[in-house]
Image (tube, helix red, strand yellow):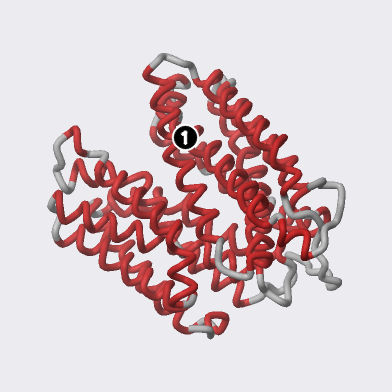
């Protein structure tokens, strides 16, 4: 395929499997870049002599960068097409990752993370717009598998980070390696992205009265991604301080959650096809609640491990499903719809961990997990009432 051409539906269908691979690899690379940064946070904190409070403040620059470019991201994707935007911002995202390694003080790190958030949001909107377009070619749910690629990238990024630190590779060469990998992927696979720009004639202003269903979808995504963020950042601490797991098994909580979330995303499309989006999300909300509450009531090693696995399955399909539904909105272009929904959702991922910490400081970590368990209940209620899930 040549990206400079516009393809008929028949030609796109004939190349659908290669398109799916290409889109999956762009999801993977975005997750790899984010996970690589996350794996080096403790090292960067130590090198810059940052306190916990300073680091927390600096980390907020990521969601700030995301928030201020919600409108711009949707506009760019709508105007120029997700394929053209993605092949540019994917490389810029990796380049900014490299710049993080060169930060010499808190101010520089904060400024770089702001732009990391800006470009990350553009990547997020563009790649999910590609995911929605790919679903239309396949005429079935495949969005969950794309997010499964992002989850696998989380594992891969953490493993690469662990390997590079164990063999004494500094942060800068580590990030340069990731940059090279992303450039190679973009060079090989950009031509297989789905070409074209948004076809809707109606121009939509991001700052006009928001489509209520999109806001509600974003809130559903927020509940799920806040739970994800809490599990990513606090599961190890929970197993250490609440479950009292042996030192060598503290990682089991995080690993059990991540494995089941990745597995759930790869089987999620088949589940959605069988049960429908509404029922799948309702069951997911119940699993989130039961899993987190079980770990609160019975903070024992084996029970908590099973509970965290349940939470992993519970969050697996939520965000892919919400994005898929948002991209099919008839009143708003896919780029703007995804910008709105994903920005609200991703705020949960970024704000969930600090919220857990604040609640834990006021009460206890165990109690904070109990509070977050009710996000599953709230999600269940919203899904049950939202009209876009009528297919049941």
Q: Is residue 346 above or below residue 380?
A: above
Q: Residue at x 53, y 84 (%)?
A: 391
Question: Disc 1 marks which residue?
Answer: 157
Kindly tell me whether residue 67 is visible in this rendering: no
Horizontally, residue 262 falls left or right of residue 141, namely left
Residue 121 horizontal/vertical position (percent): 63, 49
Query: Callout 1: helix, strand or loop?
Result: helix
Q: How crowded is mark 1: few (under 14 residues within 10 Å), some or many (20 or more)?
A: many
Kindly give the residue lying farthest to the front in the view shown. 14
Residue 27 horizontal/vertical position (percent): 58, 47
Which is nearer the eye, 43 or 25?
Answer: 25
Kindly tell me whether residue 291 is visible in this rendering: yes
Kindly give the residue lying farthest to the top in the view shown. 168
How many numbered marks appear? 1
Which is nearer the eye, 87 or 382?
Answer: 87
Residue 249 horizontal/vertical position (percent): 20, 38
Q: Is residue 102 above or below residue 91?
A: above
Q: Residue at x 66, y 75 (%)?
A: 211
Where residue 15 sits, quadrant-wise, is bottom right
Residue 43 horizontal/vertical position (percent): 42, 24
Which is nearer the eye, 386 or 195?
Answer: 195
Horizontally, residue 301 falls left or right of residue 127, namely left
Which is nearer the eye, 138 or 120?
Answer: 138
Q: Residue at x 51, y 68 (%)?
A: 219
Q: Residue at x 48, y 83 (%)?
A: 392
């Amino acid at each position: 395929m040549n990206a400079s051409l516009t393809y008929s539906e028949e030609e796109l269908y004939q190349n659908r499997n290669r398109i799916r691979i290409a889109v999956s690899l762009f999801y993977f690379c975005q997750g790899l870049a984010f996970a690589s940064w996350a794996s080096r946070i403790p090292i960067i904190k130590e090198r810059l002599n940052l306190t916990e409070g300073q680091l927390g403040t600096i980390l907020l620059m990521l969601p700030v960068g995301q928030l201020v470019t919600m409108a711009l991201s949707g506009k760019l994707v709508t105007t120029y097409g997700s394929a053209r935007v993605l092949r540019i911002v994917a490389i810029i995202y990796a380049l900014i990752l490299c710049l993080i390694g060169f930060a010499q003080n808190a101010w520089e790190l904060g400024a770089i993370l702001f732009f990391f958030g800006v470009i990350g949001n553009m990547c997020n909107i563009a790649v999910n717009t590609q995911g929605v377009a790919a679903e239309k070619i396949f005429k079935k749910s495949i969005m969950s598998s794309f997010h499964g690629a992002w989850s696998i990238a989380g594992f891969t990024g953490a493993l690469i980070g662990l390997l590079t630190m164990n063999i004494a590779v500094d942060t800068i060469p580590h990030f340069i390696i990731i940059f090279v990998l992303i450039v190679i992927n973009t060079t090989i696979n950009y031509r297989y992205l789905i070409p074209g720009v948004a076809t809707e004639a109606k121009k939509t202003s991001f700052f006009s009265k928001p489509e209520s269903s999109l806001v509600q979808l974003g809130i559903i995504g927020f509940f799920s991604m806040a739970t994800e963020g809490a599990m990513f950042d606090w599961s190890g601490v929970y197993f250490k301080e609440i479950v009292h797991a042996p030192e060598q098994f503290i990682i089991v909580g995080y690993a059990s959650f991540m494995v089941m979330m990745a597995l759930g995303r790869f089987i999620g499309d088949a589940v959605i096809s069988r049960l429908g989006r509404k029922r799948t999300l309702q069951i997911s909300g119940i699993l989130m609640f039961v899993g987190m509450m079980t770990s609160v009531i019975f903070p024992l090693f084996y029970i908590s491990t099973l509970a965290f696995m349940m939470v992993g399955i519970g969050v697996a399909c939520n965000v892919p499903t919400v994005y898929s539904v948002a991209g099919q909105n008839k009143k708003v272009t896919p780029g703007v719809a995804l910008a709105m929904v994903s920005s609200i959702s991703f705020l949960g991922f970024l704000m969930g961990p600090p919220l857990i910490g604040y609640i834990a400081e006021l009460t206890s970590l165990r109690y904070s997990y109990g509070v977050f368990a009710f996000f599953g209940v709230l999600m269940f209620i919203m899904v049950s009432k939202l009209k876009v899930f009528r297919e049941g």
